[in-house]
Amino acid sequence: MWESEEFGSEHEGRPGVLLVDGSEPGPVLFDAGSGPSVHRSRDWWVYDGTLGAPSATELRGACSCGWRGGTTYLIEWDAVDRRRPYLADTSGPEADWESHIADVLSRTVPVPADLTSLLDQIEARLATLVADEPLAALRTAAALERLTQRVATDAAFSIDTVDGPRWSTVAQALGISERAARSRMTRYVHRR
C-alpha cells in the first residue's frame, strides 16, 4: 500500500490488476476450511491463477477513493519471485498514483505560505526538543493539540451555516470524500 500522510485512508494507493478481458476482479477469498471467517486479499500477486484465483495480465495504479490509472503495465509472471512477490517492480503504477495525489492536492484549498513555513519551523524545533527534552516536547504537543482543537471547532462552526459551502466544495477543499468531510466536520463541531 502507498500512503499519503495528509490524506490517510482516503487515498491509499496500491497496484490494481486487470484480467485479460480488461475487467477488475474483486478480492480473492481464501477459505481456511473451518470457522466463520474467510481471508480476503487484493494484493496484486494473489491474482496469479492458482488456488482458484483469477489470472491477472496487467497492473495499474489504484486508489481507495475509486481512481484508477489510465496506463497499464504488463505482468510478467515468470519474472515474479513467488516467495517474495512484493519485491517486484510496481514503480509505474505507483508513479501514476503519485500523479493522482498531486492532482488531488492541486485542487485543495492552499495553506498560506507563512503558515506552512511556521509549521515547518515548529516541526524542526519539536524534533530537537524530543531529543533534548522529551517531557517538554510532550507538554508542547498537548498545547498544540488544544490549539488545533479550538481552531478546528471554530472553523467548522464558521462554515457549517445555512449559506456555507456545499459538502462537495468542502470535500474538494480538503482532498477527501464528502462522507469523510461530513465525519470530520461533525467531529470538530461536537468537541464543544
Image (tube, helix red, strand yellow):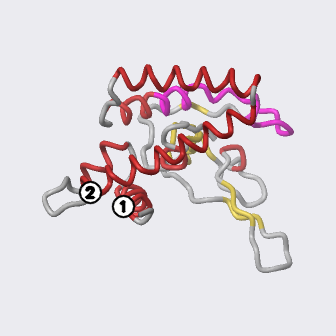
Question: Image point 37% across, 58% down: which residue?
Answer: 185
Q: Which residue is mark 1?
A: 182
Residue found 30% across the figure and 42% down from its top: 173
Please tell me which residue lies in front, 176 or 185.
Answer: 185
- Check disc 1 and report its element: helix, strand or loop: helix
Q: Nearer the viewer, residue 41 or 124?
A: 124
Q: Amino acid at mark 1?
A: Arg
In the rendering, which numbered label is found on residue 167? Answer: 2
* Residue density around tag 2, few if under 14, some if 14–19, many if 20 or more, within 10 Å: some
By secondary structure, the bulk of the magenta-drawn segment is best described as helix
Q: Is residue 168 left or right of residue 174?
A: left
Out of 192 and 91, give the one closest to the viewer. Answer: 192
Disc 1: CA contacts within 10 A as few (<14), some (14-19) or many (>=20): some
Which residue is pictured at 47% across the width and 44% down the height? 147
Q: Nearer the viewer, residue 11 or 181?
A: 181
- For the N terminus, give its image quadrant: top right
Find numbered disc 2 in the image and state the secondary structure of the residue it sits on.
helix
Q: What percent of the width, then of the height, locates residue 17?
A: 57, 44
User: Picture coordinates of residue 163 (x, y %)?
Assistant: 13, 58
Query: Is residue 6 rendered magenta in the image?
Result: no
Q: Where residue 124 appears, x then y in whole percent?
A: 60, 20
Tags 2 and 1 in contact by the CB under 8 Å rule?
yes
Q: Of the residues shown, which amino acid type is indicated by label 2? A: Trp
Vertical side of 157 occupied by 112: above or below? above
Placement of 101 over or under 44, stated as above or below: above
Residue at 42% across, 50% down: 150
* Magenta segment: 77-98
Q: Quadrant of residue 161?
A: bottom left
